[in-house]
Image (spheres, helix red, strand yellow):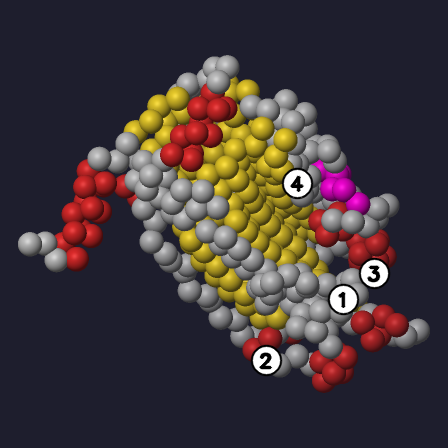
């Protein structure tokens, strides 16, 4: 007789052996067929989307665990939501250990691909795009995992989002690698998240290239342990087209990277240049909040071994107050690295704890400017600190983000 353990093993392997491969092509009933497969698929099953353009009028959703959805390529299999009448996004995933690969989602009414509350999501060679170009009416997010663990986004393209092309929020254990983000307000944004590696991405032609934010009034706060490395953040000079009231609507046109109120961030080995306002900014959260648990100031930011180039040649002074203030203080000599200097009043007087300081390693000929807020408020005092050497003490490299990736399912 089989014991309970033996029966469970038998059932598991029986299903693994008989995992189904479903194939579907574009056609009049393709939306109904695909949604039905997403409902009926069992763990281990694969839904294969054939080459072609699928015209959908309603959003899709996947709730089954361990399902793979694969197309013939991000430019060959296209899920077109131009005629979308219902649904807040193109595809919503709420199940664990899902593989999404080799297809495109375009012109959704809202977000293109939203993933919420999952453990294990693997997005590979996907494309999200609004084909009419930058437009306030475009959906907010392209690839949009939130409140999730073990998030892998690799080889994807995100174009035209009115908030962020690739956004990971309130999540943990994240790898965002080898992607292209263009013509979004924010190319890539990591928000209120823990343990993220953002590497080898090509981020250009956005309003802001790469953002690392921590915001109040969210269930998960205190974003930390974020590494941003080996990226290209170049020519991010698209006018900000985010709807008014969104936090990214405050990002200056021409921003390479921006760290807001996050802690324990390491930025290294990046190419950052041709951003009209600022290559790299470090700022505190600037709105009033009643959230008693929120800490609005950046801490432990380590910036080293980056290659900074041309920037500050066309600062966004007409629409952005922060940039206008910086340009006035810089007197025509805009820095590569900017820190607004805002801290708790006690730290502004006596200094930050050593482990919380901003540290600047070797960044070639990069220039630096920090504002001294107290002097800024007083007449006859110089509110500008350009002493790069003062910030060179300390700095600690962070550990690589690691989690199990099902490589056999990604082939």
* Mark closer to the chain start, 3 or 1: 1
Say which quarter of the image contains residue 357.
bottom right
As rendered, which of 297 and 107 lies closer to the eye? Answer: 107
Q: Position of residue 301 (x, y in %)?
A: 59, 66
Quarter assignment of residue 363: bottom right
Residue picked out by circle 4: 140
Residue located farthest toward the right when viewing the structure as drawn: 379
Q: Are marks 2 and 1 in contact (CB under 8 Å)?
A: no
According to the image, label 1 marks what residue?
A: 289
Using residue 161 as the reference point, say whether residue 328 is left or right of it.
right
**In this rendering, which labeled residue sits more in front, label 3 or label 4?**
4
* Secondary structure under the numbered disc 4 in the rendered image: loop
Name the front one of labels 4 and 2.
4
Q: Which residue is tagged 2?
A: 354
In the picture, the disc for residue 278 is none
Q: Are marks 4 and 2 in contact (CB under 8 Å)?
A: no
**Residue drawn 55% across the image and 42% down it:** 114
State the residue lying farthest toward the front.
1
Q: Which residues are magenta?
A: 235-244
Please, is residue 373 above or below residue 122 in the view? below
The answer to whether residue 31 is magenta is no
Choose the circle earlier in sequence order: 4 or 2. Answer: 4
- The image shows residue 252, relative to residue 328, as above or below, that is above
Mark earlier in primary sequence (2, 1):
1
Where residue 329 is drawn, which disc sits there? 3
Labels 1 and 4: the sequence-earlier one: 4
Please name the residue shown 49% across and 70% down the image.
Answer: 396
Q: CA distance from mark 1 to mark 4?
A: 23 Å
Disc 4 from disc 2: Cα separation: 39 Å
Identify the residue shown where x is 42% and y is 34%: 38
What residue is rendered at 56% in x and 78% in y? 355
Q: Is residue 117 above or below residue 76?
A: below
């Amino acid at each position: 007789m089989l014991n309970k353990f033996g029966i469970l093993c038998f059932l598991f392997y029986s299903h693994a052996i008989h995992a189904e491969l479903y194939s579907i092509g574009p056609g009049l009933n393709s939306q109904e067929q695909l949604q039905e497969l997403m409902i009926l698929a069992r763990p281990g099953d694969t839904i294969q989307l054939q080459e072609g353009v699928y015209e959908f009028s309603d959003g899709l959703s996947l709730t089954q665990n361990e399902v793979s959805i694969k197309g013939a390529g991000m430019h060959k299999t296209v899920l077109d939501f131009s005629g979308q009448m219902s649904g807040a996004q193109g595809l919503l995933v709420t199940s664990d250990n899902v593989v999404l690969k080799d297809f495109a989602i375009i012109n959704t009414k809202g977000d293109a691909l939203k993933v919420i509350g999952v453990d294990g999501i693997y997005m590979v060679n996907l494309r999200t795009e609004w084909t009419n170009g930058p437009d306030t009416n475009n959906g907010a997010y392209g690839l949009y995992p939130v409140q999730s663990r073990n998030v892998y986004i690799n080889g994807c393209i995100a174009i035209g989002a009115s908030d962020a092309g690739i956004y990971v929020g309130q999540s943990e254990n994240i790898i965002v690698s080898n992607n292209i983000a263009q013509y979004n307000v924010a190319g890539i944004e990591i928000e209120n998240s823990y343990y993220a590696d953002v590497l080898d991405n090509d981020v250009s032609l956005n309003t802001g290239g790469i953002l690392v934010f921590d915001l109040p009034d969210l269930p998960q706060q205190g974003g930390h342990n974020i590494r941003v490395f080996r990226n290209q953040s170049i020519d991010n000079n698209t006018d900000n087209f985010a709807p008014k009231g969104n936090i990214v609507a405050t990002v200056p046109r021409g921003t390479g990277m921006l760290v807001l109120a996050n802690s324990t961030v390491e930025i290294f080995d990046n190419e950052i240049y041709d951003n009209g306002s600022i290559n790299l900014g470090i700022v505190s959260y600037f709105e009033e909040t009643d959230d008693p648990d929120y800490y609005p100031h950046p801490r432990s930011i380590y910036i080293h071994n980056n290659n900074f180039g041309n920037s500050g040649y066309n600062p966004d002074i007409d629409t952005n107050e922060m940039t206008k203030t910086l340009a006035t203080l810089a007197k025509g000599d805009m820095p590569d690295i900017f820190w607004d200097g805002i801290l708790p009043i006690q730290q502004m007087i006596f200094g930050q704890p050593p482990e919380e300081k901003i540290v600047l390693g070797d960044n070639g000929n990069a220039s630096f400017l920090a504002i001294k807020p107290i002097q800024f408020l007083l007449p006859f005092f110089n509110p500008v600190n350009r002493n790069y050497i003062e910030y060179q003490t300390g700095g600690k490299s962070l550990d690589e983000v690691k989690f199990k990736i099902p490589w056999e399912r990604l082939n």
